[in-house]
């Protein structure tokens, strides 16, 4: 609850005034968590740095109506599966759960008759405009902080350069992932899982204004577009109160001043993004893709590798992983092995 999504969710809940928060989690920011617990009268706050056992017990005990999952990384898969077992509605802000274990998430959703609502701005947008006879969908991307850098300059990019996102205010990992567009690769795979699409049906274009979040292309030539200011509180509120829109905002883009320009995603500048399309059907390689990225982002932020080496390490790790995961334990093993290989590759750079 102390991360970007968690803090914005608390703002939304405060404004709506109709939800009671049973529990919240934090990773390291204990002081902020204590402050928020007092302000929002949260009965229980948990540190999830070491394990999730107490959280899972709480979820079983309280059986909440709504659980918001915004745990970063591979750990979000276990939390999402438990939330689907214990909640009526799960708001999913963690892409990695579907990237790594999409079939497990969908099985749990069906088995427990639970609602699964995406909180990503793009997937929330798709949900609002989607209809069955879709030929393809389009997700937009900002292009990240280095979108105007020449390719030959990327090698000298520092963490402080990459963390200056031009549109969204987010956590460090997702901001780096926006610059490599690994995040958008995750979103392509997430869209495939949520809307039963093939990756070839999910197009991505760079859209600097950040006003259009998604489009759907229908077989009769119609294109439906979701447009609005880049504000994560809107999809969070929509997920909480769906199918109603109870969040009062009334701030709309000035259409006279918009240009709505779009650009292709440069394969040379964003190689890690295109890798997502190549591993669409392989959950083992998708898990490796995420694990290697987690390791690489941390290494980059610690100045252990260069920005351009992120994609190279991810590709090497994905190449080396061959497996046929059957359950969560298999995925955990693949995740651990992928992290080990990523560290090994980084040491050899």
Image (cartoon, grey):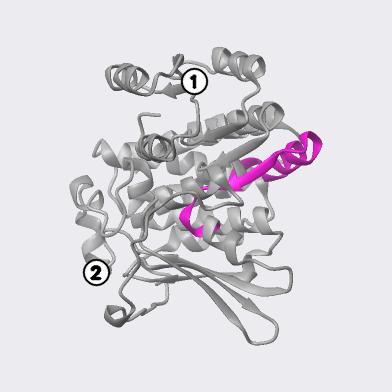
Q: Which residues are magenta?
A: 99-123
Q: Position of residue 224 (x, y in %)?
A: 56, 76
Q: Position of residue 34 (x, y in %)?
A: 32, 16
The answer to which image quadrant residue 101 occupies is top right
Q: Residue at x 58, y 14 (%)?
A: 53
Please identify the residue farthest to the right as the structure is shown: 111
The magenta stretch spans residue 115? yes
| Structural crowding at the residue carrying mark 2, measured as other residues with C-alpha within 10 Å and reported as few (<14), some (14–19) or many (≥20) | few
Do the residues bearing badges 1 and 2 touch, measured as CB atoms within 8 Å?
no
Q: Position of residue 23 (x, y in %)?
A: 49, 20
Of circles 1 and 2, the one toward us is 1
Q: Earlier in the sequence, mark 1 or mark 2?
A: 1
* Residue 192 located left or right of residue 263: right
* Residue 88 located left or right of residue 66: right
Residue wearing tag 2: 148
172 or 4: nearer the viewer: 4
Q: Position of residue 78 (x, y in %)?
A: 61, 29
| Structural crowding at the residue carrying mark 1, measured as other residues with C-alpha within 10 Å and reported as few (<14), some (14–19) or many (≥20) | some
Q: Secondary structure at mark 1?
A: strand
Q: Secondary structure at mark 2?
A: loop
185 or 87: nearer the viewer: 87
């Amino acid at each position: 609850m102390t991360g970007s999504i968690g803090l914005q969710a608390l703002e939304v809940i405060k404004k709506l005034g109709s939800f009671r928060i049973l529990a919240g989690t934090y990773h390291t920011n204990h002081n902020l968590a204590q402050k928020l617990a007092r302000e929002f009268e949260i009965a229980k706050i948990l540190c999830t740095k070491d394990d999730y056992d107490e959280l899972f017990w709480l979820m079983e005990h309280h059986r909440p109506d709504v659980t918001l999952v915004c745990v970063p990384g591979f750990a979000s898969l276990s939390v999402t599966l438990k939330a689907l077992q214990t909640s009526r509605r799960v708001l999913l802000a963690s892409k990695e759960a579907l990237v790594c274990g999409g079939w497990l998430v969908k099985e749990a959703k069906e088995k427990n008759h639970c609602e699964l609502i995406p909180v990503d701005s793009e997937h929330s947008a798709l949900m609002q405009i989607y209809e069955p006879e879709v030929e393809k969908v389009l997700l937009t991307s900002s292009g990240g902080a280095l979108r105007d850098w020449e390719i030959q300059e990327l090698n000298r990019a520092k963490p402080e350069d990459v963390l200056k996102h031009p549109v969204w205010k987010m956590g460090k990992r997702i901001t780096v992932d926006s610059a490599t567009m690994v995040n958008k690769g995750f979103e392509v795979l997430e869209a495939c899982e949520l809307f039963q699409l093939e990756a070839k049906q999910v197009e991505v274009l760079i859209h600097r204004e950040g006003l259009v979040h998604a489009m759907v292309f229908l077989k009769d030539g119609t294109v439906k577009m979701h447009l609005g200011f880049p504000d994560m509180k809107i999809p969070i509120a929509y997920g909480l109160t769906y199918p109603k829109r109870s969040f009062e905002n009334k701030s709309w883009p000035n259409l006279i001043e918009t240009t709505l320009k779009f650009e292709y995603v440069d394969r040379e500048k964003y190689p890690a993004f295109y890798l997502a399309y190549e591993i669409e059907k392989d959950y083992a390689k998708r898990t490796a893709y995420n694990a290697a990225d987690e390791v690489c982002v941390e290494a980059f932020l610690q100045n252990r590798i260069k920005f351009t080496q992120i994609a190279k390490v991810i590709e090497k790790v994905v190449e080396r992983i061959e497996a046929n995961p059957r359950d969560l334990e298999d995925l955990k093993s693949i995740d651990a092995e992928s992290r080990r290989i990523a560290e090994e590759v980084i040491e050899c750079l």
